[in-house]
Amino acid sequence: MKKITLKALCIFTFFTSSPQLFAQTTCDGSLPFEEKNGFLTIEMESGNLPAGSNWKTGSEPDPNVEGANVNYIFWDGNESFSALTGAPITYNIKINTPGTYRVVWRGRIGKGDSGGEHNDAWLRVAADDFFATKRNDINDTEVLEPKPSCSNNADRECPEGATTGGFFKGFMNRHPVNTAPEQRWGFVTNTNDGNSFRFMWATFNTAGNYSIIVDARSNFFFMDKIVLRRSDVSDTVALNLSNPESSCAGVLSITNNQKNINVKTYPNPTYNTIKISNLPNQAGTLLIRNINGITVRQIDYKSANKIINIANLQSGIYFLSNTDRSNYFTRKIIKL
């Protein structure tokens, strides 16, 4: 739910070895939303919904806030119960205070008359640890971890039911018909079939940039907002519906000269390889920098198209650029 329709403007200063122009740019989901005071709120329609996918947006009166609307996203395509759809939405975040944070979204079942259908989506937090507990206690002895890492961790169990590629199935069971309208929307992110683990957690060992990835599982599961709150912050504070969306920390902006260079990168986000097309020169050098401006890869190319394997890079945000000052471009890459 958004009370302010104009999104915040952000400025990011990104230092490189050559002069760049920097501009204001709009918070739109590709920019890191910034944690402050131990919690972070993201309106899920603020994400960059993959072009050509079956992700849709909707709006309806909010039964829990008088005079307000709920703006939400949902999947209007085939359901994907055992695998990812390949159309993830990535929400980049900046954590200022390290620690373990609860991860929960507000949603409702948007179709049918069953509390067990159209009620879930895939969720992953690219953090130092991502796990689920039965109780509101990060030291709970009953702990789940997504596959495949749970298979190699003797201290943790794998979820009953679906899990894949580091993603939990996050579900809710608030009945879409047999409950009062004000009870149909709720902050619920259960996992584990038959014996719900109600609390998902992400641990961030150091301050820095991380990401939340959402993929579709059921269709017509409406998702309003996602909240992270540190373990020492109460749900009462973090899940207050009057909380505004977190401001963005900003990211590298583009200059006017860059806007006319039609370099394309895909798939993006990606796990392994990134394909680059329409490079401005037939030969040159590409650089990949991390969020701190450090060059982590240098690649020479000899045609307008190039494929780069980035499987060995850590998950996070990177910037692809070239070294030609007259045809300079920068593209953001999200490594899952």
Image (tube, helix red, strand yellow):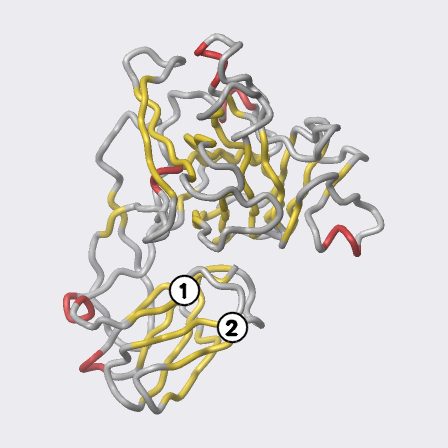
Closer to the camera in the image, 210 or 86: 86
Q: Is residue 254 above or below residue 98?
A: below
For residue 333, which numbered disc appears in the image? 1
Q: Quadrant of residue 229?
A: top right
The residue that mark 2 highlights is 310
Tell me what residue is drawn at x 23 percent, y 64 percent.
254
Secondary structure under tag 2 reads loop
Mark 2 closeness class: few <14, some 14–19, many ≥20 residues within 10 Å: some
Q: CA distance from mark 1 to mark 2?
A: 10 Å
Q: Quadrant of residue 225?
A: top left
Tell me what residue is drawn at x 49 percent, y 33 percent.
227
Of the numbered discs 1 and 2, the one sitting upstream in the chain is 2
Mark 1 closeness class: few <14, some 14–19, many ≥20 residues within 10 Å: many
Residues at badges 1 and 2 in contact (C-beta under 8 Å)? Answer: yes
Residue 241 placed where, x, y %? 41, 21
Q: Is residue 165 above or below residue 79?
A: below
Q: Amino acid at mark 2?
A: Ile
Q: Is residue 239 above or below residue 8?
A: above
